[in-house]
Structure formats: structure tokens, C-alpha cells
Image: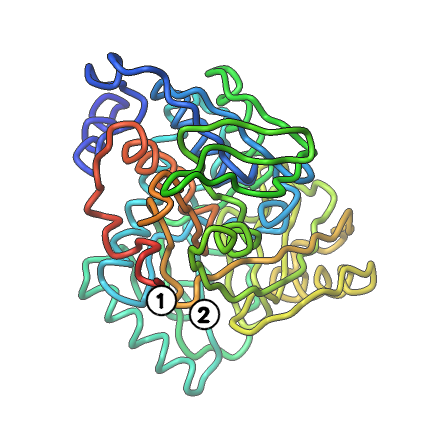
Amino acid sequence: MDRRRLLQSLAGLGGPALMPSAVRAQRRRPRVAVIGAGVMGASIAYHLAAGGAEVVVLERVSPGSQATQGAFAMLIATHEDDRAFNDLYGMAVLDWRRLELELGGAVQVQWGGTATWVPPGPGAAELDAVTRRLQSWGAPVRPIDAQELADLVPGVVAGPYGAGVFSPDQGTLDPIQALDALVAAGRRRGVAYRYPCEVLALKRDGQQITGLRTGQGDVDADVVVLAAGAAVPALAGQVGVKTPINLVSGTLAHSKPFPRVLQRVLNGPLGSLKQDPDGRIVTGADYRPGASGTDTSRAYGEQLLATAVRMVPALAGVELESMSLGYVPIPADTHPIVGFCAAPSNLYVALTMSGVTMAPLMGRLAASEILDGVAVETLSAYRPARFA
């Protein structure tokens, strides 16, 4: 599919925020303050600026210093919760392809798919059932046996094999590289980034937020976007908005650059494993439900890489470069919290698990809602008001 046809197809999903409408062009440029400079905040800022807004992004430390830098960053195309949520993930992955074209290759995505497998036992039956359910929804997944896994990932040592599934539409990227590309694209559109700049308070006048009080002075805004991940509940709570989350943590080992071995993401019994475009191996065993991994020691990192070599012996000789620790905010019901609040009515929340996966889609749809005053039906089930 060529670029024009892809963008036309995406227009049917809610309309790209990059093409200002005649109505939008006649209005005064809205001033939007985005709190949070992770990949979600940067995407929203970029799409808003491309639509004509005057945008400032405020970040307590530096871009990507919170959840983004610790993300495994698998681009997820399916979700087993319910059909509508599954469809949302499919749209999100498609938007990464749109963003790749839009930014002219500045974002580097590996589109090799994801191979997942489990050992014999109850987990195998559960994975088979999930795969069948996803297939019944039309999701692009297919079950694979041990031989098919070996064909997809030459040299993999699967261990005892119970069941597997291949998700060809999934991909992965280096989240910081992608964030840098979004920040640069936003700046070319006029986005101002201020950091380190801590937001101390939301300034409210009746049903409206008038601006922000920060460590560097006050910031006026017509609309405030909360895209600060784990910090959203406390900030939203200042004005009576509930955004309950569960916070999980995990650590990842990052290797020094290594010759190309992996073309796909692997999710096996020993953990998750991928190779970024720059050759670095990234692996970890955390971010499971209820996880609380915080070990960033060199010894643990070397242990993780040794486990990766057990899974893919061709990685022998890989060397640890760094460890990362990330805290992932997961909404209490696991579904995104996205949209304007009932009050204050100009406060927009963008909080979701799988933030890297969702960033381009949420950026595009949020910009449309903020700039054009439309309520995107795709997001109707995920509004903050459900927690009121």
C-alpha cells in the first residue's frame, strides 16, 4: 500500500490530525500544555502542533526519563480482554506504520512479528484458547508448533514445548530512539519543551483550568493534557478527577551492539527477548501482573543475558552495557483513561498501559478531539468519567 492510500485508510479511523480543517484554520491557535514528555506526551504534542496548536511540554526530569526509558517496547497488535479492546490494539499498530511514513524513516521499527510459546501444562491450554478467541475476532495470529517456531527463529532452543502462537503484525523499536524522533518532529512544528520543570499545581477557576504553577513560574493554557504516566493520579486528584492505577515495575538488560541475530520478538518461558535496530539485545523477565522487579545490578543483568543465550545460543559472547528500571502505570480496569474530564472541562487525560504501542494512535485521536471538538467514538468506552 502506497503512502497516499495508507493515509486515506487511516482517515477512516478518525481522520489524521495532520491536515488542519477549514474550521480549525479560522480559529485562534489554542494554547495547550502537555504534562509529561514520555512517548505518549511527545506524540500528543507533535500531533497537536501539526494541527495548528501552540504547544508547550513540561517534564519533571527529562524526556523519556520515566516509563519510556524502561519500556520493552513491543508493538502489540492484539489483546485478549474483549473484542473492542483488541481492535484498538490493531488500530494502534497500524498508526505506527502511518507515523513511520509521516516522519520519513526517522522512526526505526522492526516488523518481524512476535513468537510466543509456553511449556506443557495448563498454560498451553490457556494459550491455545486465547489464540482461538483472537482468531474468531479476525486478529492476525496463528498457532505454531515447535518446528514452526524453529523455522521462524533459526537456532532457538525452545525447551519443553506445549503451545505457541505467532503474531506477524507485531513489531518492536527502541523507545528512546522513537521518542527522540517525535520530539525532533514536534520541535520542527514549534513545540516548546521545558525540563527539568516540575508541575506543582493545576490552577483552576470554576469549571476550567486556567494554567499551571511550575517550578519555573506559571504557564497559561486553554487546554491541559495529563500524559505524565504514574504521576497522573496525583495531578488529576488536585481537581477531583479520579484516575486509579496499579503500578508495576521491571528491569531490562541492554547489551552492547551485537551482530544481527534476531528478526523477531521472542516471548518464551525464560523471558522476553529482542534485538533493537542498533544491534543491542534487550531482555527481561519482569512486567508480569503483580511484578515488582527492581534489581538493576550488573550481576542480574549478566544473568538475564546468560538466560538469553540459553534461548538463542547464537548470542554467545553478548556483553552487558546497561540496566533500566521502569514503572508502568496500568489503569485499575486495564483499559485506557482517555479524554476530557466532566470537570474541569478543559482537562484532557491520556493514561494507558502499553503506552509505546498506543502513542501514535492516541496522539492522533487526542489532537482531533482537542482541536476539532469532536468526540471520537473509538474512545467512548475509555473516558475518565467512568471512575467518578
Q: Nearer the viewer, residue 371 or 308?
A: 371
Q: Residue 21 is drawn in which quadrant?
A: top left
Q: Nearer the viewer, residue 193 or 116?
A: 193
Disc 2 or 1, which lies upstream in sequence?
Answer: 2
Residue identified by numbered label 2: 117
Residue identified by numbered label 1: 144
- Residue occupying the point 33% across, 57% down: 78
Circle 1 packing at 10 Å, graded few (<14), some (14-19), many (20+), is some
Query: Is there a contact, CB below 8 Å, between mark 2 and mark 1?
Result: yes
Q: Which mark is residue 6?
A: none
Q: Secondary structure at mark 2?
A: strand
- Residue occupying the point 74% across, 51% down: 318
Q: Secondary structure at mark 1?
A: loop
- Distance of mark 2 from mark 1, alpha carbons? 9 Å
**Image position, residue 275 (x, y; %):** 59, 47
**Image position, residue 18 (x, y; %):** 32, 22
Q: Amino acid at mark 2?
A: Trp
Q: Nearer the viewer, mark 2 or mark 1?
A: 2
